[in-house]
Image (spheres, grey):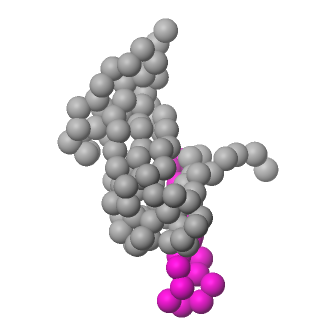
Amino acid sequence: MDEEVIPVLYVEDARTAVAWYARLGFAEQWEHRFEPGLPAFVEVARGPVRLFLSEHEGDARPGTLVYLRVRDVDAVAAEFGVPPQTAPWAREIELRDPDGNRLRVGTPTSR
């Protein structure tokens, strides 16, 4: 098993969040509920990159910032209709998911 860090993001509606993250290339891996009608806990993945999306209050704070490195930020920017900005370390965009979590998405620049 490879060690990894998986950010947990609070979402109010897991179905809405999963659909939004699909636009970023993430696919749902699994969903867990302790019982029907209770909050969902969902894993989404984009290749080896994983996120946990949790409807459980207290698992994470809304407005969390996650940095996502991708091979082609321009393709992501086009999908969301935002222009990338160039920083010394990367071309980047910043997105907010439906719950206000921030994702800074970037492609490193050659140094």
Q: Position of residue 82 (x, y in %)?
A: 23, 38
Q: Position of residue 4 (x, y in %)?
A: 70, 46
87 lies left or right of 43:
left
- Would residue 100 be seen by someone viewing this image from the given angle? yes
Residue at the outermost top position: 111
State the count of labels.
0
Residue at the outermost right position: 1
Q: Is residue 23 above or below residue 42?
A: above
Q: Nearer the viewer, residue 60 or 76?
A: 60
73 lies left or right of 81:
right
- Would residue 42 be seen by someone viewing this image from the given angle? no
Residue appearing at x 58%, y 67% in the figure: 58
Residue appearing at x 63%, y 84% in the figure: 34
Answer whether residue 98 is magenta in the image.
no
Answer whether residue 38 is magenta in the image.
yes
Magenta span of residues: 30-47
8 lies left or right of 77:
right
Residue at the outermost bottom position: 36
